[in-house]
Amino acid sequence: MAKKVLVVDDEKLIVKGIRFSLEQDGMEVTCAYDGEEALQYARSQPFDMILLDIMLPKLSGTEVCQQIREFSNVPIVMLTAKSDDMDKIMGLEYGADDYITKPFNILEVKARIKAIMRRTAAREASSPPENIIVRGDMRMDCESRRVSIAGKEVNLTAREFDVLELLIKNPNKVYSRETLLKLVWGADYPGDVRTVDVHIRRLREKIEANPSEPRFVHTKWGVGYFFRA
């Protein structure tokens, strides 16, 4: 079955180029040119990937990303200005899984999309049925990729879930930021360790009653992060 990608950018030439290139690889591409249109598409049909520009009419890319995260864990890759680190950080803060800087090489875009799709497919294929992990009042279903705290479901992004799953399956093992970046994002990921810090902070905000005094995901200062059994 063809992979479905939503491409969102108000620059029609960029959208046309990405669409042509992805369709050459057998993907099914839907295009949107503003934030409201993107949100409507994301609500009305499932996608395997969303490419989302930061600067959009009507709703910004970060606003669209934030709203999509209220109902979907679809992988989202933000398209950002090359020199604007704040855009990259804000995109990750609002739930994006990755980012690509403009101007970009379409071959890089395709390689990153395929890498994320491969990891998603491998993760789903390797998840054994009834793979339930319970730690205190946290319950993680690794098959359906759902997490609940005290019976209340927590909506995690795909990357947040991956980080938590790795940590919870290896309790008390400390992972450096560099190791987490390599294991969760992949060795070919061009971002830096700030990506890990942003995701850990967002994860704590969602699963910890008091993020400044975490029960689950702890920091070993100068070393990295770990899940306390």
Image (cartoon, rainbow, N blue to C red):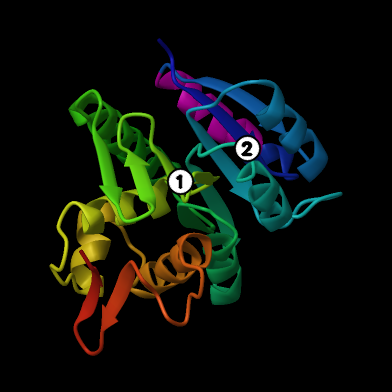
Q: Earlier in the sequence, mark 2 or mark 1?
A: 2
Tag in front: 2 or 1: 1
> Above or below — where is 44 with respect to 187?
above
> Above or below — where is 24 with respect to 215?
above
Q: Is residue 220 visible?
A: yes
Residue, disc 1: 148
Q: Is residue 9 magenta?
A: no
x and y percentages locating residue 123 in the rendered image: 25, 34
Q: Does the magenta stretch include residue 16?
A: yes
Is residue 164 or residue 42 the one in the foreground?
Answer: 164
Q: Report whether 196 appears left or right of 3.
A: left
x and y percentages locating residue 45 in the rendered image: 64, 20
Q: Residue at x 39, y 73 (%)?
A: 197
Tag 1: amino acid: Ser
Q: In which quarter of the image is the C terminus?
A: bottom left
Residue, disc 2: 71
Q: Report whether 138 appears left or right of 201.
A: left
Q: Residue furthest right?
A: 58
Q: What stretch is highlighted in magenta?
A: 15-25
Q: Report whether 1 appears left or right of 19.
A: left
Is residue 102 or residue 54 the one in the foreground?
Answer: 54
Contact flag, marks 2 and 1 (Cβ < 8 Å): no
Q: Which residue is drawn at 44% across and 20% down?
A: 3
x and y percentages locating residue 202 in the rendered image: 50, 65
Mark count: 2
Is residue 197 or residue 10 the one in the foreground?
Answer: 197
Q: Can residue 187 be seen in this view?
A: no
Residue 140 falls in image quadrant: top left
Q: In which quarter of the image is the N terminus?
A: top left
Mark 2: which secondary structure? loop
x and y percentages locating residue 157 in the rendered image: 48, 48
